[in-house]
Structure formats: C-alpha cells, structure tokens
Image (spheres, grey):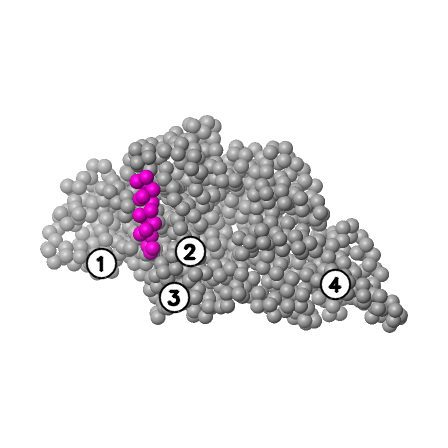
Amino acid sequence: MKKVFLSLSFVDADFVRKVHARLPKGLAYFYERSFDNGEALLDAMGRTVPDSALFVFFASPSALASPWVGFELDAARTKSIVDSNHRVLVFPTDPNVSHSDLPVWMKDYWVPKAGMTVGDIARYITATLLELETGASGSVGKVVGRGKTADRYEQLIADHLVRTHRTPNVYLLGGFRGIGRRTFASHFMRQSLAAEINLRFGPTFSLPQEAELVDLYATIRGELDPLGDVDAMISDLNAFRGVGSDEQIKEIYRQLDHFFRLNQAVTLISAGGFFEDKGEPKEWIAPFLSQIPDNATMFLISNRLFEADLVERLGNLVQMRLEELGEKDIETLMVYTASRLGIKGFQPPRSLIPSIGGHPDVANAAVRLIGLKGSHIVERDPAQIFNVQNTILGEVVQAENFSLMELKILQILGWVPSLSGHVLEKIAVAEADEEPDFIRSINSLILSCLITMTGSDYSIAPSIRNIFRRFNPAPQPLISKFSTVLREEWRNSLERGEFSVELFEAFLFMHALEGSALPKELRELVTPGTLSELVREAYSRGKDDEDQDALKKVISWGALAEDMPMSSATREEILSTVARAQIRLGAYGDAGKLIERMNSSGFRASLFLKGYLLRRRERYSEAVPLLQEAIRERKYYRSAVHELALCFKRTGAMDQLKALLEDHGKMVGDSAMFADFQIGIDLARGNLIAAESALEALRKMPEDEGKSDLRQAQLWMKKQQFKPAIQLLSKVLDNGKRSAFHARCLRAVAAAKDGDFGLAFRDLDFLKGLPGRTVAVLRIEAAVLAEQGQLEAAEKRLDEVSDPGPPDWLQRARIKELQANRPETSISDRRRLLDEVADIRVKHRTFLEYDLD
C-alpha cells in the first residue's frame, strides 16, 4: 500500500489535522509524524520513507527551530532518503518562513505559490497523488488517444487568437459522460498549457443539474473557508440571496480571486446545469462568463456546447466536443487498465471493442468484468443484446463481482450525491485491520470507473448508480450505521464550529432516505440545485421501488420550492417531479390542480404532465395528442415517447407504435421499456425462444426496474407452468416493493389459473385497497372470476370498464372460450363462440393476454 507522511511540529498539529481531513482517504495511508524528536525521526525515516510514495513537510518557525534541523546529515544518509522511490513536498505554514530558511537538501522541494490555506495544501497533495502518468496513487490512470484531440483544441485556440486578438480564459469541454472530459482537461492543462504550471492545482466544483448562482457560491465557500456554525452559514446565504445577480457574480469572483492569484484554474462540472432544457444557456451564464477577470482561467465540463452566437459575443471562450475514443485507443486503454488491476494474460476481445462505442468508463468496466469472469461474458451474439454498453454495466454490478468492502462502498455512495473519504471509511470499515482492504477497494473501483472523485469526496459513477441500487439493495444494518455516523459527524462539526457544505448535503439526503423531515432551522441552508437533486432522487427511489412513503416525501420536500427564491426553470423541474409523484400516488385531483398552476405560469412541462396524468387514468385517446405535442416541444422528450408508446400499446395501435419506434430509433436503442415491449410481442405471437433469449439482456439494463422478472413469469404462464410463475412472483413481492403492483396482479391471475383461489382473492383484496388502480383491478377481478367459473360475474366486471382496450377484449375472449367449453353449450353456440374468440385474438395478436395491469 502507498504511504504518505505528513511531517510537522506539534504546534502545527491542528492545521495539519484539517489538511488531513481534506485528503482523499482511500488513495493511500496518511501518517502524521512530528519532527520534534530529531533522532527518532531519522530512524523512522530510514526505516519507512523508502517505502513511501510522498513525504510532506509543513515548514513553520517552530518546525525549523526543532533540534533535528541542526543535525549534520552525511551524504549517504541524505541519498538513501532523497533518492528513494518517493516524492518530497515542502509547504510553508507561516508567511515568515522563506525558501532560504530550509536545509540545503530540502530547498529543491519547496512548493511555490501553492497557497497557505487548508484547502490549498490538500488540493496540491491530492493533485500530486493523482497526477496523470506519474502520480503516486495506485489508482492513477493513463491518458490514451488524446494527442490529436489536444492538437485540435490548440488549433481552435489559435483560430480564436487570430479572430479576436485575445487569449481565451474559459475552456468548455462537452460530450457524453464517461468519455474522459475531466481527465482530458487535466491533461490539457499539464501538456498544452504547461507554461502555467500551477493551473492543475486549482479546485473542481461539481454542481447539480439545476445549479444556480447560490449553489456555486455555497460550494466555493466550503472550499475556501467553511463558516463557523449553522447560524453563520444561514446568515451568509441569506445575505447572498438578498442582492441582485450582478452583485452575486461580483461576490463569487471576489471569492474565486484567491485561486486566480495563485494562477490556478477553476473547473466547474455539471451534466447539463449550464443549460435550459431546450439548450439555451441559463440566465446567469452569459453575465457570469462575461465578467471573468483577465487573470483567471476556468474550465467548464458539460454534456452540451454553447451556440456560436454566444461564444462570439463573449469573446473569451473556446469550446470543443470531446469525441469518443477510436477502437485502437480503446484496446490500448483496456490493456493498461488490465495491467493496473493485476489481470494476468489479458487479451482485449476485439469483437466487442466496436460496441463499446469509444467510452472509457465502459471499457474499464469491461476489463474488470473479464478479469472476474473471463472474456466469454462479453462475447455473446450481438443479436441477443439490446445495448452492449448497458449489458456490460449490468453484468459488472452483480454482487458476486465485488468484495464485501467494495459492495459496502458502492451501497453507501448510492444514497448520496457524494461523501468524503473519511466519513465513507467510518461507515464501511468496522475493524482497524480492514483499512488496507478499504484502500485497495477504493483504488480498484476508481480504476474500473465505478466511482469518481472530486477533491476528497467520492461519488458512485452516474452510469451505474440506478442499476447498482436495483441489483444490490442495502442491508438495514448498513443503513443504520450510515445514519449513526452521519449524525455523529454532523454533531461533531457543529461542536468544532466547522460547518461543511458537503456534510450538510449528505445529512440532507440521509433524512430523505430515512423518510424524515429536515429540521425547520436547517431549511434555509438548502439551495435550489440541491433541493432539485434531492426531490429527483426520492422520486426515482419511490418509482423504482413502488414506495409510497418515498413518493409522499417527494411532495413534502417539493413544497419547499413554493417559497424558496430560484429561477423559474428550477422551480419547473421540482414541481414537475412533485406532480409525477402525486399521479403515481393516485392523487389525480391534486396533480391536476398543480399542473394547471404550472400551465398558468407558462411552464412547458405542463403539456407532458397532462398527457401522463391521462395515460395513468387510462384515458388514452385524450392523452395521445398531448404527448405527441410534448414530443414536438422536446420537453421530457424521452418520457413523452415512452408514454405515447404505452398509449399505442394499450389501445392496440401497433402500426402507430411501430412508426413511433422507427421515428425515434436513436432513443429506443438503449430503452428497457422498448426491449420489454418487444418481448411482450414475442410472447403474444408465441415466439417463446426469441423472448427467452432477450430476457437475460433486459435483466441487465439499467432501466429494467423488475420488468424482466414479470416477463419471465409470463413466459412460464404461456407454457402453462403456473407454479414456477407464482414462486417467482412471490419472491419479487417478498424481496421488496419494486414492481409490487404488477407482480401482485400477475400472481392473482397465475394463482387462479393454477386453481389456488385463496391466494388469488387475497391478492385481489389487497389490490382493491390501492389508490388510482380501479380499472386494472376490475380487469384482474374479471380474470380471477372467469377462472373460478363465475363467467357472468366476470363479464359484469368488464362492463364497468368505460373505455375497453386490448386487455379487456382478450379477457372477453377468454370468457367466451370458457363458455364454449361448458358441457351445456350447444355445438352451434360453441362454434359461434370459438369463432368470436379467434376473431378477437387475431385482431389483437400482438398484445399479450397477461398484460392485464
């Protein structure tokens, strides 16, 4: 394991403790060593420094006055320390210490212009550990295939100079997540902007999707100098909110000037947080970028680029879309990653490489998967895989692919946007001897692109966040420890007078996870971007797990947006999520009122939400035109396509569904919903082999959300194997809330088919108590009554369905079939009934009779 020594005098212990707390726990062992006993120090250095990666000396008047400085070091002893395989850094902690005060052998290691704050020094040490190609950490990656990319960016900069006669100081890198935008930015600073050697030691601020100026301000304050207590932070945020946007921008640059004077670049990261949903820059972006000081350098990492007219108006920005890696570069990257992960005899599967799509995170995940299970796991018939990239990620997140420590780390990070390494370790490490395992796990997960790091904070990779949580629900003891440690850390930070924005956000998400409300006195600390993320996260959990408590929490947390100062775009996103939660809870009246208020405010989301509300109420013909208009508006485009497809599917409009899939093919390719549709069509047509082969791929897709289990049960039901179907559906219901409604509907029908009417009616009674499911329950009750032989009662239930669709007609076909097979039915009536059955089933031949919910 790598070791880093933090060497100090006892009078600097408090300062070094704070530096230590800001270092990324898990990248190495961080040892504090005092220089106050020179003889003991020299012995310790002689024994251990050759094994260390980094030796850090905090130079203060007290440290330099220690007796050890006066020792004459013979040349051999100096050589054994200095020439070992390690780095040495010297940081002054007092402005009165100068380069000339150091011993001769240490002068070469003096770090100029690193800054003297806790955050400055911690960033410098972290950057040294992670420096590309040469960093001291075991998780340092290698930059592959970016030489031509750097040349292209330099050419764009040269063109900018010729055109504007001005050196740019804002650099935007756009493109898909997971293709190495942050890595390239660091590489470009070090290689192409090498004359400015301190640029790469600047801070990186990761902003939420709906980021506003107050989110940026709070994050900067946390990096520079955390305020002493909650009241001070509330006062500061309220003072910031109380001034106009121009004053807010000036205050942000006043804070950022600390980094600019050190000639350090500031990097802002947000997936789409610089843009509105149509692609225009957010209201604050142009004023913010136009006021950047001439001595500043800023990098923006986003998934989009600005329109050319804005770039031209600003005159200080050069942007570039970072392209995906070429196939040979992906192959090379995989070889290097395999070497760092210690995978012997690795051979890149060349048939797979084109399907990786140039994404380094997918490539690294594939390497990890191959190392664990062999190359056969990713060398399947492409025709059986809907989306190779999602299949790889779906395979890699299986629990058996992780050590216990790796699994705990990912489960913990799945609950929060990010978490400091020190807090993460306290939750994950139960015994002291588990520390080496923790460090190994962190390094392995970083190299595999399964976690990312910003400063001292870790996050689970966005590409696996949802699918990991689906396959690996956290055990309650770990959730309890997570809560206990976070509460203790929060309490301790307040007692020390060291308010931490990052810790507060984790504390906030913990409350949402537990389903508890945030104390009123802390609500003023919530920023719009964080609230939007929290509400979105709670909705995702409630939707995926069919957790009504989580959906109710969306509504209560979202109520904060009514009075909180924020942009209309952010308010629209939060209220849209609240409306979705209300619809899922069957609170159609409340949802309708909220949607009307949003429509009156000019929120474009109201169009989609009206269509979604009508679709959930099975008013398909009314929903279709609204959803078609929402697609044209491209507001919630992907969701609108999904909802429209459901309308076509439920009404049997298969030609329209086919046209929809053809028109939106690019979006359909990685959609679990459309993969599920195709399996349903295969089952309906009796193509059971095709359905069975597609099920495994669906199960690995991030948005499967239990669809594959339901389709597996339907496959068994098509084969008349009702008992295995009941067992699987019972397991789904026992293991959690995901797909619970659909699983219970299907189990009621399977049990009735199997003659277990006690189970069927118990499930039916449970379903009758759920809000907003009246039509589906009528349909299920009709199916159960029909199998029990109560055909007239079954028909009466179907008569109550006001707008019957394919599932209702297919259920009528089943009733007619059962009537035809009654002994008392005459031969002529039997023929008539069976002809009617055949006509109905031909008309709805692409609709599965078991899609009754």
Q: Nearer the viewer, residue 613 or 36?
A: 613
* Residue 43 point in image, percent of width and height: 19, 58
* Label drawn at residue 348: 3
Residue at the location (47% across, 52% down)?
462
Callout 1: few (<14), some (14-19), or many (20+) C-alpha neighbours within 10 Å? few
Task: Specify the quadrant that holds the C terminus.
Answer: bottom right
Residue at horizontal 70 percent and vertical 71 percent from the top: 720
- Report which residue position mark 4 lands on: 841
Residue type, label 1:
Asn
Q: CA distance from mark 2 to mark 1?
A: 33 Å
Residue on which disc 1 sits: 85
* Residue 282, above or below 553: above
N-terminal of the two: label 2 or label 1? 1
Q: Nearer the viewer, residue 139 or 232?
A: 139
Identified by mark 4, the residue type is: Arg
Q: Which mark is residue 359?
A: 2
Labels 3, 4: front one? 4
Question: Position of 664 compared to 139: left or right?
Answer: right
- The stretch in magenta equals 143-159
